[in-house]
Image (spheres, grey):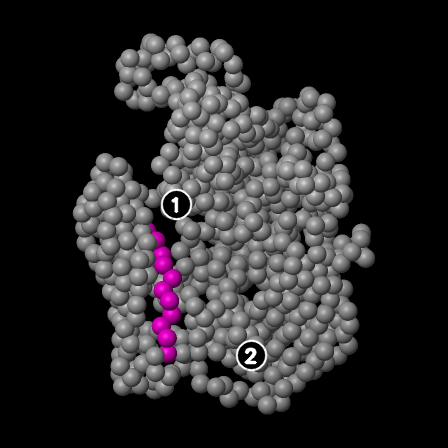
Amino acid sequence: MVARDRNHPCVVVWSLGNEGGEGRNFAAMAAAMRRLDPCRRPVQYESCGALPYTDIVCPMYPSVAKLESMATAEGQCLTYKANGRRYPPADPAVVGRRPVVMCEYQHSMGNSTGNFHHYWQAIDRHDCLQGGFVWDWCDQGLDMRLMKAPAIAEGEGSSRSEAAPAPADEHARASAWGYGGDFGEVMHDSQFNINGIVWPDRRPHPAAFEIQHVQQPVRLELADWRWTPVEPAAAARGRGHLVGKGQVRVVNRHDFISLAHLEALATVSVRGVERPVQDFGRLSLGPGQAAEVDVAASLALPSLPLALLRARLAGGALHLNVRLELARDQSWAAKGHVVAWDQFVLVAPTVHELGGDVPPAGDPWPPPAARPVEMQRTSSEIRVKTAAGTYAFDGDTGALRAAAAPGGRGLLLAPLVPCFWRAPTDNDSGGVEFMERWAAVLPALISIGVRILPALPPWLIWAIDNVTASLGLPPVSNNISYRTGWQREGWHRLVERPKGPPEVERDMAAGSVAITTASSLADPDAPSTERVRRRTRVEVLPTGEVWLTSVCDLRTLLPSIPRVGLSTRLGAAFAAAEWLGRGPHECYGDRKLSAVVARHAATVPELHTPYIVPSENGLRCDVRWVALRDKDGTGVLVVAAKDMQFSASHFRTSDLEAATHEHDLSPRSEVNLHIDHKHMGVGGDDSWSRVVYPEYLVPHGHYEWSICVKVLAAGEDADEAAQAALLRAPAAIKREVDHS
């Protein structure tokens, strides 16, 4: 091979193979390659660890911490175990520090590829860490319909009710991607090769956008930003301008070309609506160069959420957006294609910077003068009528179970109830359990572990982990999937039991009603083990806002549960979504840098991500409000005191969990809405251990958050209604709002 290909300039590195073990034969091959190649191209081999015959240390699926430890010769040469193998040591004094290129990392199986930015932060800190190869490029699925597989002939597995809305992606439904086990084979790896960042037909997964953004060739950083105070007289007339100035640091990460082919421009987003502020033109930065670029923005006072800003309730309302676009058509993309971008939260201007605390004439949302709410209470229901709609609460649990617009049309099909479960992702299911199908051919000791470990009770695993930690050994629990742990503790079937009837208070001065409840949640198979202790307070305002504060104390021996939130179901007609938050594509706490904060709109089917093996999907993060409307514009608005995550789908969690293929799903004539306070990350270091980082977990402890639910009238602007809801919120909730 070397003699044949050594004159091809496209060959830059020789490889000794993949996952073939190590020994003297490999050392001999490396020596022969070096003798035969006069250009002395590097030779690399992963399975020899750091032994001298590899010129590149090329680990497979290291954690970020392990990768960063390889930035020194000593760290590279330590014995370490990864991906089921022990890599041999070497003498750092002999081999020195070598380049580190991960031959495989970020196993992108299903809803995955979390933590990606952490890898590249480490790579940017150390010059010998030079990147890696995400595994894999595409989902290795076969279109079973094109193969005319009899098991899923046209029309089977994708039938849906005539009343149901259109599916999320007609092409995905028509394709019916197959994987291991779908073709009659006995020994297979199931969906293990459905691990790409694009579908088999090369449509990008949401993870592809994250990789694109993190690896973009220009780095942007906000170096400074300051507001110039508005003249009080101009502010009082409502005619002044808020002027901001700052600097953006631009770093050209290219090694060989300048940025002359790009045009830079900046905008400022005010509650998700972009306003152009500056066009930089061309930036003549050479390879590896950096510079600070001045940025200025002038915003008319009427364009700002002044009432929120003066009340210090407008955290995250202002963003600076910087984009670098192609200045002319290229062979690979058209003019205007965005090559690099970033978004920066701008500190909210102070009252002084806004021109004082006297609101200008015509300032919106004065104190409401609505009539007090009307309340009726029976043994089964508490019904409250407001100016904007009527709400009904369960007489036992206090849960909001009905919301109706004036005129009587109902919006909810199910109560708003606590939710702590999600349809497990491939990474959630990653552990020794995946090896069960191979148990018969595994070495005896490993086979026993595969069968026994998942069956151990959580308290025993927790005790074993304490012992192994005292001995300096890794935790046993890391080999057991999150899914198994969650199911053993019953998080998928918790039942809520009230601790007494709801307490109802009327505030005659404010014209509002407050409903307070206490409850506990437990697995019905272990009712004495309380998993969640919950307290809720609902305040119904005469203007139609329903503010709900939830307090949950979680009890678990696991490092994390799936989520802490609420769920409900709406009628199928409420399928037009709009939100202020990250988007437009799906994002999670550990995979959200590529999702821009803006006002987004999508249909509910478009919010669904059609992973080949269905699982939790479609989340949007850092959301200030979300609205779901019907074709006439009537709908429901949910506002966060701080921020929240949401997903909306025509599939229930149980549908996603039960299906093994996307084409098995049948959309329901309903919208399943999840509103999350916290949601566990998806992980991505690998798919066979617990790989969600601590900052993205939802551990045991105390959680408290507030949201507002309101009926939206046709034509009512969702953002204006959300601002009004924050201004009218009870004082205790206003103290909870992000003031930054």
Q: Are marks 1 and 2 in contact (CB under 8 Å)?
A: no
Q: Residue at x 76, y 68 (%)?
A: 498
Q: Residue at x 40, y 81 (%)?
A: 364
Q: Is residue 346 magenta?
A: yes
Identified by mark 1, the residue type is Val
Relative height, residue 101 to residue 724 (above, below): above
Mark 1 neighbour density, 10 Å: few (under 14) some (14–19) many (20 or more):
some
Identified by mark 2, the residue type is Pro
Position of the C terminus by quadrant: bottom left
Q: How many marks?
A: 2
Q: Position of residue 425 (x, y in %)?
A: 59, 43
Q: Is residue 368 magenta?
A: no
Residue 414 is left or right of residue 76, and the answer is: right
Relative height, residue 250 to residue 34 (above, below): below
The tag on residue 214 is 1
Residue 377 is left or right of residue 587, and the answer is: right
Tag 1, which secondary structure?
Answer: helix
Tell me where the magenta segment starts and ends, as one range.
341-351
Q: Which residue is mark 2?
A: 730
Q: Earlier in the sequence, mark 1 or mark 2?
A: 1
